[in-house]
Image (tube, helix red, strand yellow):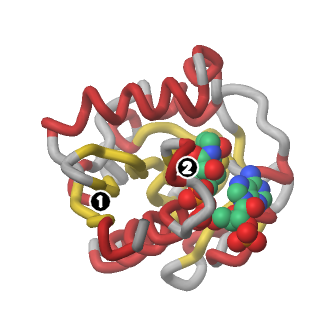
Amino acid sequence: MSSADIHYLPEQPAHDAEIDLINEEAFGPGRFTRAAYKIREGGPHERALSFVAIHQDKVIASVRMTWIAAGRGRALLLGPLAVRPAFKNIGIGRKLVHIAIDAAREAGAGAVVLVGDAPYYGPLGFRKIPTGQLSMPRPVDPERLLAAELKDDTVASLTGEVRHAALAEPSLA
Ligand SMILES: CC(C)(COP(=O)(O)OP(=O)(O)OC[C@H]1O[C@@H](n2cnc3c(N)ncnc32)[C@H](O)[C@@H]1OP(=O)(O)O)[C@@H](O)C(=O)NCCC(=O)NCCS
């Protein structure tokens, strides 16, 4: 399969059912217990900054972005990111992360935060957030709490409890 056969689009409501299946396949029932999932329960994701990869009219990968707030900072939480097994390791995950980050920058976001593997996300511009700076609603390995800074000093402004932006002070939401 050539990468020319794969198209990247902003997510639409019509993609929801396929995205749910992809996330179920990638993460299993345990996905509901993850810290990032708990934050995402606080409100909707930002569809305009979330993307799918399409092959022959089917969704084969998805990345979602959700506005979050922590302390006086505001950022986007990236995830879930999932690629269907038959399409892994051909660059789709990386491409979706690049597209999502570019869209986040365009939208004026100062940082993108995620919980994930540093060996994968490091080359995509993510660095570990200093241990103890942020508190997640469920325990996470501090080595996996990462951020890509898009505007100077945004990551430092993210402190304390991470929440969905819709649950933050009105001045931040
Ligand atoms: C992780 C995932 C999104 C990567 O997507 P992908 O399209 O297969 O990956 P890409 O083609 O962009 O990148 C492949 C490279 O990343 C590496 N890689 C994949 N997952 C990795 C991980 N968890 N840690 C480190 N490296 C990883 C591959 O070994 C490969 O390396 P290479 O380029 O040196 O051969 C995909 O494997 C997936 O859906 N996994 C299950 C869900 C998941 O774990 N999501 C991430 C949550 S943080």
Report the side of 141 relative to 32 (left or right).
right
Q: Is residue 90 above or below residue 67?
A: below
Q: Position of residue 101 (x, y in %)?
A: 44, 72
- First in sequence: mark 1 vs mark 2: 1
Q: Nearer the viewer, residue 168 or 4?
A: 4
Quadrant of ligand 1 in image: bottom right
x 33%, y 31%: residue: 43
Q: Is residue 49 above or below residue 63?
A: below
Q: Is residue 100 above or below residue 66?
A: below
> Is the residue under label 2 in contact with that under label 1 (CB below 8 Å)?
no
Q: Nearer the viewer, residue 65 or 169?
A: 65
x 26%, y 27%: residue: 17
Q: Nearer the viewer, residue 128 or 85?
A: 85
Q: Position of residue 86 (x, y in %)?
A: 53, 46
SS category of the residue bearing label 2: strand
Give the crowd class for mark 2: few <14, some 14-19, many >=20 residues within 10 Å: many
